[in-house]
Image (cartoon, grey):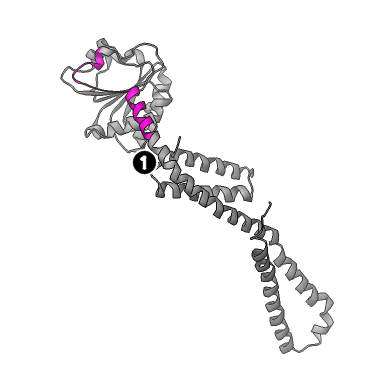
Amino acid sequence: MIGEREILGQIKQAYQQSKKHQLCGDTIRLAYQQAIVFAKKIHSETRIGEKPISVVSLAFRSLTARNFFKYANILIIGAGQTNNLMANLLTKDGTENKVSVYNRTLRKAEELAARFKNAQAYELGKLAHHKEDIDIILTCTGANYAVLTKDIFDKIVPKHRKVTIVDLAVPQDVEDEVIELKNVDYIDIASLEKKAQENLQFRKGELYIAQALLDEFVIGFNELYKERRLELALSNIPNEVKNIKNNAIQQTFKKDIESLDQNSKDVLEKVMQYMEEKYIALPFKAAKKNLLNKKFRP
């Protein structure tokens, strides 16, 4: 999804796993590092990540816009992927709401409930017997019928109590008679998807800015890649120069050097050290000057 930071996290995780198993080399390392740099640049210099385009994120924002949300008692119906994504946002936000989770399979309800500090899990068949106060109902099941009927709603919610219902199921989990009640604030997936499409169009507009930044960044990356390839190609030169110097001292001119006094030996060592450093620098300077201006093929 355009501009989503979660994708950046997935890239980091994928790279770390590849590196751990020694499945990527220096080129991938360089590309990965620069991808992270560019992603941060995009988010700081464009508005591409400003408006959420996932239905779950929009639903969460709708809840946080309600002042009572932080202290609300939450009833969750269904323990599938969507409600688990909602749980990610709820727990990340640090809220300590009292949560009740209902699901056909109790085990999955327990797994979802375990993610909250103060939650209980129940089988879906016991929903009509719910006794705790309810401020928010989050529902998303795979049922092809209304799970939250008027009959069940009347049993678990007093007529005077205002309740916000977020229904992310297709088809809807909530019976029409419940939606029409005056004490129900109903948020459905259709309205959230409409908002998501509006936000997506906004983000697509930011793509033109992002593309211009990318074109510029790629030019810089190509130069960086050339320099890195050059460094690797010339990386053994210092060792080769050192070996030549050591061979000259220890073998080729060994007897001549031994005949010198200590002061002469010290001067010779300084001269050779100076020459070594200069000779090592020469190929790097020459290569950068002459090769980096040419088309470089890896």
Locate the N terminus by quadrant. top left
Residue plotted at (72% across, 79% down):
272
Residue plotted at (31% across, 34% down):
61
Q: Is residue 35 above or below residue 181?
A: below
Q: Which percent across, then down, holds residue 250?
A: 80, 75
Inspect the magenta stretch and tell me whether residue 193 lies in it.
yes
Front-lying residue, 208 or 180: 208
Magenta region, main secondary structure: helix
Q: Which percent across, then down, holds residue 179?
A: 25, 17
* Number of marks present in the image shown: 1
Identity, as a three-letter code, of the amino acid under mark 1: Glu
Front-lying residue, 269 or 290: 290
Front-lying residue, 225 or 119: 225
Furthest residue to the left?
Answer: 160
Residue plotted at (39% across, 12% down):
144
Helix, strand or loop status at disc 1: loop
Q: Is residue 138 above or below residue 244?
A: above
Q: Which percent across, then down, holds residue 190?
A: 34, 22
Segment colored magenta: 177-199
**Which residue is denoted by mark 1 in the rendering?**
50
Can residue 183 be seen in the rendering of this structure?
yes
Q: State the image quarter where residue 296 is shown.
A: bottom right
Inspect the magenta stretch and tell me whether residue 218 lies in it.
no
Q: State the image quarter where residue 235 is shown.
A: bottom right
Q: Is residue 32 above or below residue 87?
A: below
Dot 1 crowding, Cα within 10 Å, few <14, some 14–19, many 20+ = few
Q: Which percent across, then down, holds residue 135?
A: 24, 25
Can residue 115 be seen in the rendering of this structure?
no
Say left or right for 96 vs 37.
Answer: left
